[in-house]
Structure formats: C-alpha cells, structure tokens
C-alpha cells in the first residue's frame, strides 16, 4: 500500500529524513506538499530532509528579516525579498529552503521569476537561517553558491562569506558595510524577546536614524 506524505506527522522542532529519493521524486514531493506548508525542505544527493520549525524559530525569522528590510529601505537599496522560496539546482543535485533570502545586487534578474532555477538564475545575495534545531547544512548553500549566509542560533548571529569555494566566518557583512550587523541583530532580537516586537522595531529605527545610516 502506498504511503501518502499527508499521512506523515512531523512535530515542531523535529526532522524526517527520506533516503534514496530521485530528483524527480523530490520535485513530486514539493508539488504534493505545496507552498502553503509549515515544513522546510532540503535535498542533497538523494536525501530529503523535512523539518517543521518551532514557534520561536518563526518569530526570530520574521524579526531578523524585518531588520534587513528596514536597513535596505533606509539605505535606498533596491532588493527582492523571496522569503523561504525553494533554491534548487538539478545539475548539482541540491535544494534548500532558507528561512529568508534577499536578492540585492542581483534583484533585477529575479523580478517576476517563480520558481527559481539556480542552474540558470543567480543565487540570493543573502540567505538567513534560524538554527534553533541545528538543521542548517552549510554545504547546501555552499554548493548553490550563496555568497553570504547568516545563521542565528541561541548564541547569537554568525555571518559566513563564501570565499574560494568555502564558507568562512566573518565579523562584517559586505551587504551592509560599516554597520555592526552582529551587534545590532543580537541586541534587538533580545529586546524583541524581552520587550516585544513593536518596541524593538521602533528603537531599531531610531538607532538607524541617529547613526546616519539613512540616506
């Protein structure tokens, strides 16, 4: 008897691995699950990982994404936020769904494109992963050529830059030169948790204006 994906229950914070899955089967899984789902998927060399985020994971994802949008808007930089869109490249047998991603330098190249195909389209300039459940696999992003990856864990924000084919930890973000991204994200995520999103966003906007970030 055939087992349907809708019969499988994955609890928040848990992962399910499916082995020996062909690319065509992976595409069929994406189609069956649809886009209006809570689960995140990744695929690498025949292994599909299905993960359902924890509620706090979703809050951090939305908040950090909002901080990025505020900075880009204040800097008057055009961008395309593509959220958790599936980044995939069949020739590399890789796919991943970030918690958030942004096209900045390459934003004009992806306007109106859905779905993306990274064998033809550029990767996002910035991807963000909330790693509460230790899911993030740097290899997926490395092989897909994502130049900058932010990984937020319980210990704070980490920035990884793709250099000569490998990710290396960095204290700065090339997308936001001169801005102390790690310090700001850590400070305002903590404030969001302790004092609520609205107050943290207002104070972040005040910091941006007081420090001459806005153009």
Image (cartoon, helix red, strand yellow):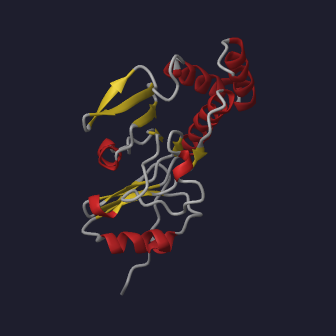
Is residue 83 in sight in this rendering? no
| Left or right of residue 145, residue 178 in this image | right
| Front-most of residues 13 and 91 | 91
**The N terminus, quarter of image:** bottom left
Residue 41 figure quarter = bottom left
| Left or right of residue 200, residue 84 in this image | left
Q: Is residue 155 above or below residue 111?
A: above
Residue 64 figure quarter = top right
| Left or right of residue 206, residue 108 in this image | left
| Left or right of residue 205, residue 77 in this image | left
Q: Is residue 180 above or below residue 96?
A: above
Residue 169 figure quarter = top left
Q: Is residue 152 above or below residue 112?
A: above
- At x 29%, y 69%, the residue is 21
Is residue 173 in sight in this rendering? yes
In the rendered image, residue 76, in percent from the top left (x then y), is placed at 66, 31
- At x 52%, y 25%, the residue is 176
In the rendered image, residue 146, in percent from the top left (x then y), is placed at 39, 43
Q: Is residue 137 above or below residue 96?
A: above
| Front-most of residues 158 and 127 | 127
């Amino acid at each position: 008897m055939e087992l349907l994906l809708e019969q499988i229950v994955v609890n928040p914070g848990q992962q399910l691995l499916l082995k020996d899955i062909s690319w065509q089967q992976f595409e069929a899984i994406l189609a069956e699950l649809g886009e209006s789902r809570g689960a995140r998927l990744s695929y690498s060399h025949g292994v599909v990982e299905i993960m359902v985020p924890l509620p706090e994971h979703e809050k951090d994802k939305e908040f950090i994404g909002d901080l990025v949008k505020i900075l880009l808007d204040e800097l008057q930089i055009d961008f395309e936020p593509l959220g958790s869109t599936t980044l995939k490249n069949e020739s590399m047998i890789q796919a991943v769904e970030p918690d958030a991603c942004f096209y900045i330098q390459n934003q004009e190249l992806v306007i109106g494109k859905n779905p993306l195909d990274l064998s033809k389209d550029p990767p996002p300039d910035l991807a963000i992963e909330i790693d509460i459940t230790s899911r993030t696999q740097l290899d997926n992003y490395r092989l897909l050529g994502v130049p900058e990856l932010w990984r937020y864990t319980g210990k704070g924000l980490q920035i990884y830059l793709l250099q000569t084919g490998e990710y290396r930890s960095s204290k700065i973000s090339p997308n936001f030169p001169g801005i102390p991204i790690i310090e700001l994200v850590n400070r305002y995520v903590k404030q969001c948790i302790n004092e609520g999103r609205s107050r943290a966003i207002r104070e972040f906007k005040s910091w941006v204006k007081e420090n001459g970030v806005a153009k």
